[in-house]
């Protein structure tokens, strides 16, 4: 996680950096008294503020100044994890426009029919750390299977299954039966359609797939499908310490 930088900046630059448009547009917003800082209207684009703990509003919408963006999204089905979609809406349409302007990126894509936890950021180092195979950040998936999962099938997943185009068998870090047809599978890799292919390799089929945890960060029960929220400081710390040994 990038360290928060202590800096003093002109209000016009602050609003621009936070994704509210080009400098000229941000200047107009400020001159039109559509921006408040720490509860007070400021109509001076050149007024300088300390960005640490800065709270502001733009057109009545409240924001905190954030040097970098770290958030989670509860991805719905039939959404694509891409800025340039082919058949379905993009997950970025579920975010406020200023975050999209800041060029936030999802960390590890989910298939269009897969739901659940997605991390999103504009911090390149954080994105790399969370997505790089060498860091092996564990991810937990709730898998609904067409047929009941036997003890033998679960043992097979834990031992390792051979997938087409893979040199060696791939094993889950953990696999727990929740109901006859639902398992929780933990993986450290992020190979193409990995969960679906692993389940197919043991003569079953995935009927529903939801990512419920990344590292120690779980998908909150109170985060509705399609909603997003900022990651907490404790969640960021745990994610940066979640590398699998």
Image: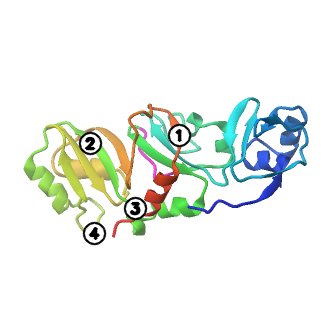
Query: Hey, which quadrant is residue 146 in on the image?
Result: top left
Distance from disc 3 to disc 4, alpha carbons, whole Å, reads 27 Å
Percent of width and height locating residue 69: 61, 50
Q: Residue at x 45, y 38 (%)?
A: 74
> Does 54 sit left or right of 223 as displayed?
right
Residue at numbered disc 2: 143
Spatial distance from mark 1 to mark 2, Cα to Cα?
Answer: 25 Å
Task: Tell me, yes or no, whether the two marked residues, 2 and 3, touch with CB atoms within 8 Å.
Answer: no
Instruction: Identify the residue at image location x=27%, y=69%.
Output: 167
Q: Disc 4 marks which residue?
A: 167
Percent of width and height locating residue 179: 16, 37
Magenta residue check for 217: no
Above or below residue 149? Residue 244 is: below
Q: Earlier in the sequence, mark 2 or mark 3?
A: 2
Residue 143 visible here: yes
The residue that mark 3 highlights is 242
236 horizontally vs 25: left or right: left
Which numbered disc, 3 or 4, marks the residue that appears first in the sequence? Answer: 4
Give coordinates of residue 98: x percent, y percent. 69, 41
* Mark-to-mark CA distance, 2 and 3: 22 Å
Label 4 to label 2: alpha-carbon separation: 25 Å
Magenta range is 106-112
Disc ID at residue 229: 1
Is label 4 in a helix, a strand or a loop?
Answer: loop
Mark 3 vs mark 4: give the one in front: 3
Q: How packed is label 3: few (under 14 Cα within 10 Å), some, or many (20 or more)?
A: some
The residue lying at 25 percent from left, 59 percent from top is 173
- The image shows residue 206 at horizontal and vertical percentages of 25, 41
Q: Residue at x 59, y 44 (%)?
A: 83
Density class for disc 1 (Cα within 10 Å; few <14, some 14-19, many ≥20) is: few
C-alpha distance separating marks 1 and 3: 20 Å
183 left or right of 6?
Answer: left
């Amino acid at each position: 996680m990038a360290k928060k930088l202590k800096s003093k900046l002109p209000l016009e630059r602050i609003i621009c950096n936070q994704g509210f448009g080009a400098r000229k547009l941000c200047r107009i917003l400020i001159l039109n008294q559509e921006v408040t800082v720490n509860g007070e209207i400021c109509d001076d684009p050149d007024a300088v503020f300390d960005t640490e703990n800065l709270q502001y509003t733009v057109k009545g919408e409240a924001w905190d100044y954030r040097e970098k963006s770290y958030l989670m999204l509860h991805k719905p089905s039939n959404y694509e994890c891409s800025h340039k979609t082919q058949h379905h809406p993009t997950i970025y349409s579920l975010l406020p426009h200023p975050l999209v302007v800041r060029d936030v990126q999802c960390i590890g894509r989910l298939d269009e029919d897969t739901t659940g936890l997605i991390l999103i950021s504009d911090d390149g180092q954080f994105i790399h750390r969370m997505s790089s195979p060498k860091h092996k950040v564990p991810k937990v998936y709730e898998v609904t299977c067409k047929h009941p999962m036997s003890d033998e099938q679960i043992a097979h997943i834990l031992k390792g299954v051979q997938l087409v185009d893979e040199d060696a068998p791939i094993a889950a870090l953990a696999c727990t039966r929740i109901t006859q047809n639902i398992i929780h599978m933990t993986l450290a890799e992020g190979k193409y359609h990995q969960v679906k292919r692993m389940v197919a390799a043991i003569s079953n089929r995935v009927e529903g797939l939801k990512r419920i945890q990344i590292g120690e960060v779980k998908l909150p029960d109170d985060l509705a499908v399609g909603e997003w929220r900022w990651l907490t400081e404790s969640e960021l710390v745990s994610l940066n310490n979640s590398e699998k040994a």
